[in-house]
Amino acid sequence: RFLCKCIDPPQTHLITTMNKNIRSTMALQLITLSLFQGQGAVAFSVHAASGNVLQSAMHMSAAAANGEADSSTFTVGVIGDLHMDPRKMEDYAIGREHWLSIFGAAKAEHSPENLALVSLGDLGESKSVRPAETKELFAGTTGCHELASEFLGSFDGVPYELVGGNHDLEGIDEFTTDEANLEMFLRVHNKPAPNFIRQIADKTLLVGMTSTVFRSAIYTSHEVTIDQEQINWFEKVLQDHSSADGWKVFVFTHAPPNGSGLRVLQENHVVNGCCWLNHSNEKQCRKFIELVREHRCIKAWFSGHFHLGQDYQDSITFPTIDPADGPYPNRGSCVFVQTSVMRAGTSRDGRQQSRMIKGNQNGFDICTVDHAKDGAVRVDATITYSDCNHEVGIYAHEDEERQGDAFFKVYAPSPGDENLIRYEDDMFFEQIVTQETKAWWYMACGRVLGMLNGSLIEYDKSTLAPLGLVVGADELIGKKISVIDSGLGDECEIMYEEGMEGAECGSFDGREQALLLIDDANDTVVVVQPNEDGSYWRKIVRNKMVRMQEVRRERAAKEFAKQGKGEEEEGIKVISSWGPYTSTSGTAKRTGVSGLTSVAQV
């Protein structure tokens, strides 16, 4: 028995307790938590069960216990990134059999109408599946979506809902526009719109939103972008289904929102700017967590995208945490849930898992269906509603790490942790940066920067979620970092340089700072300038269509250069230059890039 005392609201809306001794086993385990709230006590049970049939005691309403139909009881299967390849269908067939067994048991427990399957998108393999015939990518094609639709519609009458991911409009050889690709996606899956809403039980909604941008992406095409029309629709759904009226909303998107606290991959999604929904649009990126904080009807948010398993405790994050583990993260009433993959060849950590939600009027279980273990079902977390705006939740198992899993664990700063650098005027980090250096700090403008794995990263100032790469390890390791005041002194300087004429104080609106990389060995100092919008993280990876054009131009340039040298390629060097900025000058005089198309300055 574990005792946990409530902290007075509004700071805490959910109490978490971890049982360090609970393991996922084939035997039934029963753990009881007594929660003391005011003068009364609320007790509930969590089960970790074997086999494909699971029913948590805490969710057995009186009607269900008496064998009567209970309109509040529901079961939802959640499938992560499928990346289907018609040459490798065995794992999908096995996974389907696991789900058929689960759905069969669920139909005996409650109405089949309270049963659904949700796919989190990325339905096809992003490579050719007929390499001897064509180089056409399979993802996003008509053939891809027809195969996925056939599979998702084959679960013995269980209806499926679907959200599109960053690969689902990748049919670039078949469709010239995102709009045409999206029209096919909707038609094949019989969807009236990119978003969906389904009432799965009494006062319980499933809500999903689809990424609608690939070719027209401003930056990386693999950013999961929810268009403004869907965002407006989502906000209206939340306003019309408030927690005060007893509504519970479960949300599904391919990528998670900024502020979810889920485990991410720095070497992939962070540096490429495609971790979070609408990652590169600061206002839209933050909008989702703001809605979560405002609308406590949102009880859970499921996402895929990372191809990571469900054995880590940070594959599920609760609205609040034990005060001993850090400050209140402010995630409303929402539990965020990462979903793994079904096929072995698409997993980054060897796991093959799906999620299941089993719930009713009292709360819900979040479970793992393990396709690598004959479809065994494990309870991962149990959430109990204490009232419309408050929940109680516990993890049902500790981390189950394997060799090599540490690679997927990314440090994230939290207010007041030991790596926070506090300073008043200037900051001088005297240590030479190494691969192991960990430190972070606030800039005067409110931006948050930190060092991890030899790189300089920007973090969101509200959620402290990683946003992107500022300076790579290739440029940072071996140097020192300083932040100094770069603002105006007592007097304004009148500038006469061409293009910069005028009093510099005319545009000064607050404290200014300069971020410096100091190389003592070479006596050089590099000023890391912020972007025009004030952010620091570099939006380096651009639209895939643009990059493909650039590769074709380089290829054409090499062929052209070869014409004057016969067939010999030795000595031919083709490089590209982009800009956009090469100096602080107000007059365009040079376009050379230091160290690339002109002599390096450092």
Image (cartoon, grey):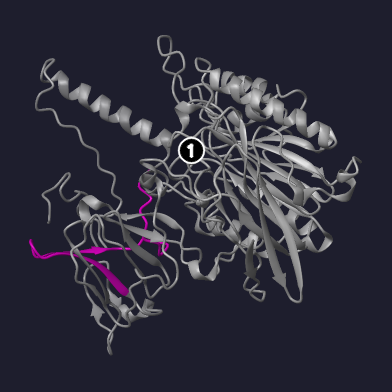
Q: Quadrant of the N terminus?
A: bottom right
Q: Quadrant of residue 507?
A: bottom left
Q: Residue at x 49, y 25 (%)?
A: 125
> Mark 1 highlights which residue?
307
Is 539 a magenta residue?
A: yes
- Could you classify mark 1 by the number of other residues whose Cα lies within 10 Å: few (under 14), some (14-19), or many (20 or more)? many
The image position of residue 317, as x and y in percent, is: 56, 55
The image position of residue 451, as x and y in percent, is: 31, 60
The image position of residue 5, as x and y in percent, is: 64, 72
Magenta span: 513-541
The image position of residue 480, as x and y in percent, is: 19, 65
- Say above or below: 290 vs 141: below
Secondary structure, mark 1, is loop
Q: Quadrant of residue 156?
A: top right
Q: Quadrant of residue 426?
A: bottom left
Considering depth in this image, is 445 or 597 the residue closer to the camera? Answer: 445
- Say above or below: 258 vs 340: below
Residue 326 visible somewhere in the drawing: no
Q: Is residue 338 left or right of residue 151?
A: left
